Image (cartoon, rainbow, N blue to C red):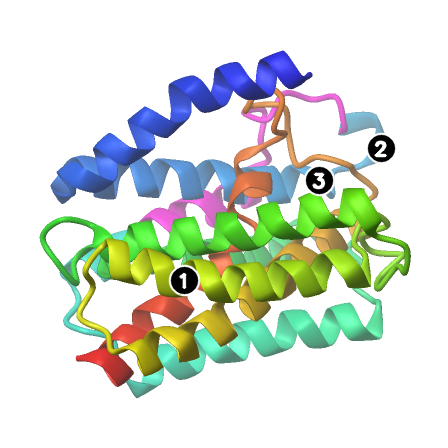
Amino acid sequence: MLVQRLLTAAVGIPVIVGLILLGGPAYDIVVAAILAIAALELCAMWRAEEAHNRPLWAVRSVELVAPLSTVLMVVAMVTADEGNDFTASAAGFVVVLLVAAMIRGKLAFRSADSLGVAALAMIYVGYLGAHFVPLRNLDGDGKWVFLAILGTWATDTFAYAIGRLIGRRKIAPTISPGKTLEGTAAGLLGGWASVIVIAEVLDLPMSLGEAALLGTILPAAAVLGDLVESFIKRSAGVKDTSELVPGHGGFLDRLDSLLFTVPLVYYFAIWVVF
């Protein structure tokens, strides 16, 4: 498993970095493709028991609503002007609904509810994920995307490392048994420091105060995003969304926290920084 993870990272990271630096249509197309696959993964998690082993591409016709709508949302973001109060409110509303469902501990779909699952995939993966496009369009070199990704990864890494080392008190045992209070605190603190350092290294047009503020809220969003995705998987009774990314699960498993942090960084940039 470790070898698989390392090999996947060795191949995937340079490709991701290259696409972010390149930007343009190639970046937009890959974003749309990854999000469409992630939307299909979410739909596949709620198939009837006898269909759990069905290949991901063997979809029901109604499930095609999710990836198609996701691609259309990416296209809309490509052609749209800068985000506004409505787009931000919609993103916030989606996040609040998902967090509220997690707190209530209820997110149940039957096999006949394919349209409901497709709608969930559309707003959760499609709408939130489509913000990768306008975030890249904020500059000519992808620095804001790098900030969102690296800040999120730093939060996850600090939380995982310290949680494994000294973590004792579980914060959400029924949703994410491995997440501890100690690890989460380390993730929040390490993420805060990392965002400030990353913003400085990338020479982003933020003051120290703005970087410190983003460093406070981005790690919290990353933790929430991770918990929500774990909650969705628990509700569906699966461990990983798929096996498409060797050693890492599925595309949705890799996007979990980013679906919350990417929109956050985008609206922070256009409202606070610019």
Q: Secondary structure at mark 2?
A: helix
* Residue at 83% over, 43% down: 237
Q: Is residue 205 magenta?
A: no
The image's mark for residue 45 is 3
Furthest toward the left, the residue is: 140
* Extreme residue toward the bottom, this view: 85
* Mark 2 surroundings within 10 Å by alpha-carbon count, few (fewer than 14), some (14 through 19), many (20 or more): few
Check disc 1 and report the residue beneath it: 195
In this image, 125 relative to 50: left or right? left
112 and 89: which one is in front? Answer: 89
Looking at the image, residue 170 sits to the left or right of residue 92; the answer is right
Q: Return the residue nearer the eye: 32 or 48.
A: 32
Disc 3 to disc 1, C-alpha distance: 34 Å
Residue hosting label 2 = 49
Other residues around mark 3 within 10 Å, as few (<14) / some (14–19) / many (≥20): many
* Residue under the point 41% across and 76% down: 212
